Image (spheres, helix red, strand yellow):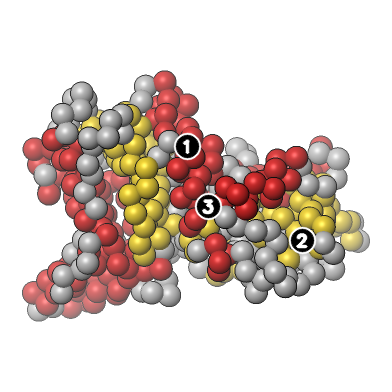
């Protein structure tokens, strides 16, 4: 059935027309997010924050960065002490959005470890020009810090030692959607439908590519996931994060020694690839409204999917990373001292009650078990020798 709200903008009609009338869902997601002239990220139409389209942890306040900085400083000091041959330590942020996390991390590192900060450079890896322009305004004001933008490809040519952070980036990677119907598997596609001189978008079933067939064949032995799960309904749909393996592979060539922290919406494979989850995890966001209709307002909304925890870990392991551990964001932030931040608010109440209440609300949102607190922190290590030991404060039991 055609959804009349899924009208296709002119530029996308041309793109789909050029491709013969239909494109894969993967291509659709890539175009609406990252098309250089029309994508929601590339044009910078999308805003992250309370007054924007959706909130991320760093957009609530600088407390997320101040807590994360405690773990980042531990890792940087561990690297410094390990005797590695590098005068410069790099803090690399992939997909920095508005640039607030990079800025606030640098400010917090300078506060926690003033002697360390002069050895640190900030490297931002941003795919989309529109977002990079916004980041420049936020990050360029940082005084006395070496700051640069780089592509992954350039970093591979000049690898670094340090810490890489990817907060809510992998969820914005285009995915293949797989449709299981009548014991057959299809690649989900998107095509045009003309109704009364207007073009709308509709899903179509396309032939699976050889890569999809290979992924499904290998998933049991490599990922310990069997497709499809038992007792699925007809037209059971799920996602394949087909770009994540090569992302880990490329990043392993970027980092000589150091840590990678992936923070994202994620769930265990049992919950992800479950007969009850009939339509995968894909969702669109605009003006803080979540919408399962991912063809609506194409090029004006964010599209996002959860990660499968086991697949993500396995993809990292296959690509040269060591797994350090994984936990929920709520647990990680409490381990890093969030409760002391909450407790210290008592001292501010008499000075500025409204600021103290706002900060309290943001801190609670970071650990909300049905919100940002349920995000997963997955940490990986890259080293040239087995001697490098990186601390795992974020995994420790919180002390009350
Ligand atoms: C959801 S935003 C996350 C923003 C930020 N990390 C935060 O927490 O507020 C996703 C960001 O990743 C960028 N991005 C998407 N794909 C990327 C890729 N392959 N490499 C680098 N950046 C990417 C987007 O342009 C955007 O800036």
- Local crowd size for mark 2, using a 10 Å CA cut-off: few (<14), some (14–19), many (≥20): many
Mark 2, residue position: 180
Relative to 199, is 284 on the left or the right? Answer: left
Q: Which mark is residue 319?
A: 1
- Return the disc, 1 or 2, that comes first in the chain's sequence: 2
Residue 80 in the image: above or below residue 208:
above
* The one of 3 and 115 positioned closer to us in this rendering: 115
On the rendered image, what quadrant is the N terminus found in?
Answer: bottom right
Label 1 sits on a secondary structure element that is: loop
In the image as oriented, which residue stretches furthest toward the top?
157
Determine the residue positioned at 89% across, 61% down: 195
Instruction: Quadrant for residue 386, please give it.
Output: top left
Q: Spatial distance from mark 3 to mark 1, Cα to Cα?
A: 12 Å
**Is mark 1 in CB contact (under 8 Å) with mark 2?**
no
| Label 1 CB sits under 8 Å from any ligand 1 atom | no
In the image as oriented, which residue stretches furthest toward the front?
221
Determine the residue positioned at 30% across, 73% down: 364
């Amino acid at each position: 059935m055609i959804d009349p709200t899924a009208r296709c903008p002119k530029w996308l009609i041309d793109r789909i027309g050029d491709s013969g009338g239909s494109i894969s869902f993967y291509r659709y997601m890539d175009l609406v997010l990252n098309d250089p002239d029309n994508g929601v990220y590339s044009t910078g139409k999308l805003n992250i924050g309370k007054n924007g389209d959706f909130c991320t942890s760093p957009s609530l306040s600088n407390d997320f960065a101040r807590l994360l900085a405690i773990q980042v400083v531990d890792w940087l000091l561990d690297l410094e002490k390990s005797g590695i041959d590098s005068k410069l330590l790099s803090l690399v942020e992939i997909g920095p959005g508005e640039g607030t996390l990079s800025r606030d991390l640098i400010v917090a590192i300078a506060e926690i470890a003033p002697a360390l900060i002069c050895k640190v450079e900030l490297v931002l890896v941003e795919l989309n020009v529109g977002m990079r322009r916004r980041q420049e305004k936020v990050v360029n004001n940082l005084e006395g810090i070496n700051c640069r933008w780089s592509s992954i490809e350039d970093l591979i040519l000049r690898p670094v030692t340090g810490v890489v952070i990817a907060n809510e980036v992998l969820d914005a990677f285009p995915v293949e959607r797989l449709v299981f119907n009548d014991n057959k598997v299809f690649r989900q596609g998107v095509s045009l439908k003309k109704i009364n001189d207007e073009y709308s978008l509709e899903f179509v079933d396309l032939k699976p590519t050889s890569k999809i067939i290979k992924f499904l064949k290998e998933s049991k032995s490599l990922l310990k996931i069997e497709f499809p799960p038992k007792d699925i309904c007809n037209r059971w749909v799920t996602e394949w994060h087909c770009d994540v393996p090569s992302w880990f592979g490329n990043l392993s060539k970027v980092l000589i020694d150091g840590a990678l922290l992936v923070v994202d919406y994620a769930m265990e494979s049992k919950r992800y690839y479950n007969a009850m989850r009939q339509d995968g995890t894909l969702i669109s966001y605009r003006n803080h409204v979540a919408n399962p209709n991912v063809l609506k307002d194409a090029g004006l909304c964010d599209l996002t999917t959860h990660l499968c925890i086991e697949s993500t870990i396995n993809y990292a392991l296959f690509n040269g990373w060591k797994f350090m551990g994984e936990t929920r964001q709520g647990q990680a932030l409490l381990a890093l001292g969030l409760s002391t931040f909450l407790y210290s608010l008592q001292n501010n109440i008499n000075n500025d009650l409204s600021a103290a209440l706002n900060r309290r609300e943001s801190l609670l949102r970071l650990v909300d078990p049905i919100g940002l607190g349920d995000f997963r922190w997955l940490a990986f290590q890259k080293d040239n020798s087995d001697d490098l030991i990186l601390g795992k404060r974020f995994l420790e039991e919180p002390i009350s």
